[in-house]
Image (cartoon, rainbow, N blue to C red):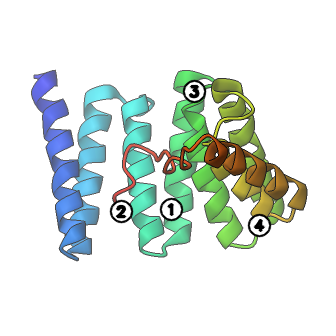
Amino acid sequence: GQAESAEAAAVTASLAQVATGQGKLDEARTLLERALAIDRALWGPAHPNVAADLDVLGDFHDGQGQHALAEAAYRQALAIKEQALGKDHVDLAITLSNLGSQVFERGRLDEALGHYRRALALDEAALGPDHADLIWDLDGVGRTLEPEHLQRACGCAEREQARGEPPPPRAASVSSRF
């Protein structure tokens, strides 16, 4: 049934994590693609779970330096999330940030800046303008040649340190394990 299929997809994704850790990258990619296929069959092609699988696949490709494949996976994930959740949903922010990173790596700075700014706007709306997690969005904006955002990021980090709280680790897509 549906519960067993969902569990099969989750177990398959976990096996992909193990295979990645063991350096069995072809096996890991095959398992990730299998988990994606299971979720597509179970939920349909435009479900947030499918987008989550695509985010994980994008993370995997990014980890292998396969920027074109990572970009394609993130673009598909973004399109699904926009359709399923709406264009202003905070869950789009991590995918936008990841997509920004991919196009940045490929030298498309204007496009990267647009993705980073949109991620920042979504996260600011959800988290507030002084939240420490914004440092990651601001870093993306700053990397695309806007130094005033880097200064703002430093201010967020300094406020957190003044309160005795280290900046939290980057919130990742469904998995940052790849």
Residue type (three-letter) at the residue carrying disc 1: Ala
x and y percentages locating residue 176 in the rendered image: 39, 54
- Reading the image, the residue beneath label 1 is 70
Label located before the other in sequence (1 or 2): 1
Residue type (three-letter) at the residue carrying disc 3: Gln
Specify whether residue 115 is in view: no
Rounded to the nearest angstrom, the CA distance separating label 1 from label 2 is 12 Å
Front one among 160 and 37: 160
- Reading the image, the residue beneath label 4 is 108
**Mark sitting on residue 83:** 3
Element marked by disc 2 = loop
Label located before the other in sequence (4 or 2): 4
Label located before the other in sequence (3 or 1): 1
Q: Residues within 10 Å of mark 2 (few under 14, many from 20)?
A: some
Element marked by disc 3 = helix
Rounded to the nearest angstrom, the CA distance separating label 4 from label 3 is 25 Å
Label located before the other in sequence (2 or 3): 3
- Reading the image, the residue beneath label 2 is 178
